[in-house]
Amino acid sequence: DADVTQTPRNRITKTGKRIMLECSQTKGHDRMYWYRQDPGLGLRLIYYSFDVKDINKGEISDGYSVSRQAQAKFSLSLESAIPNQTALYFCATGDRYSNEQFFGPGTRLTVL
Amino acid sequence: QKEVEQNSGPLSVPEGAIASLNCTYSDRGSQSFFWYRQYSGKSPELIMFIYSNGDKEDGRFTAQLNKASQYVSLLIRDSQPSDSATYLCAVNKPPVDSSYKLIFGSGTRLLVRP
């Protein structure tokens, strides 16, 4: 089984809809991250969390919210989706001792 | 100036050649450097990390770090068509209490010609 899983893998939605992307991990890592990837722009950090009670904004958090339901689960919500949120979204987990990060398979989101 | 810069490529090399991928970073306080490989439509996969100046070898891969010049490179020896992918450089964001944040470059696309 994959260490970091994301659901759904693909999602098409309409402008104004609320959607949630989910991430689960079995690596036992405390740190979890949400990134988006756009062509030519690399990976940009949306939110990150060190534990259930610790949530922090990344560089592009506007229009997004997150919830850390448990150490192993970290979800990303788009309250009112807009077309420029069309992107590839990755969840990652982090090892506190090495700063390495491990990525889930990604969710391709299209907002029409 | 971008915090982490990479040439977008594509870098095209023949099979069996050495591929050299370069990355520069802007913050002298950065201490951890990572190379990720990403196949089209897939997630980034960690292939190398380096913390100290000099070279670090792992199989066909060698990471090189020069903190004085603020660059990190990845050499791939005996390149194979299966190495064709985008290579992302990532650098931790100082200060120490923010070192868990990684700043990613936009990646260099490598094409290995059979």
Image (cartoon, coloured by chain):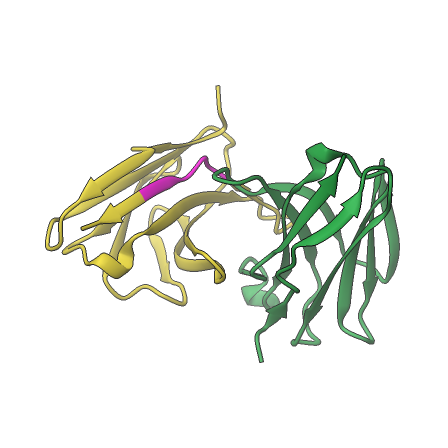
Position of residue B34 in the picture relative to residue A12 (left or right): right
Q: Is A16 in front, or is B96?
A: A16
The stretch of residues the image draws in magenta is A103-108
Report the residue at 40% width, 63% height from top.
Answer: A58
Q: Colour of chain A?
A: yellow
Percent position (x, y) of residue A71?
39, 38
Q: Residue furthest bottom?
A: B1
Query: Which chain: green?
Result: B
Report the residue at 58% width, 44% height from top.
Answer: A95
* In this view, A78 is above or below A9: below
| Residue B108 part of the magenta-drawn span | no
Percent position (x, y) of residue A54?
36, 54
Position of residue A35 in the picture relative to residue B19 (left or right): left
Position of residue B27 in the picture relative to residue A86 (left or right): right
Q: Is A2 in front, or is B73?
A: B73
Q: Is A66 in front, or is B11?
A: B11
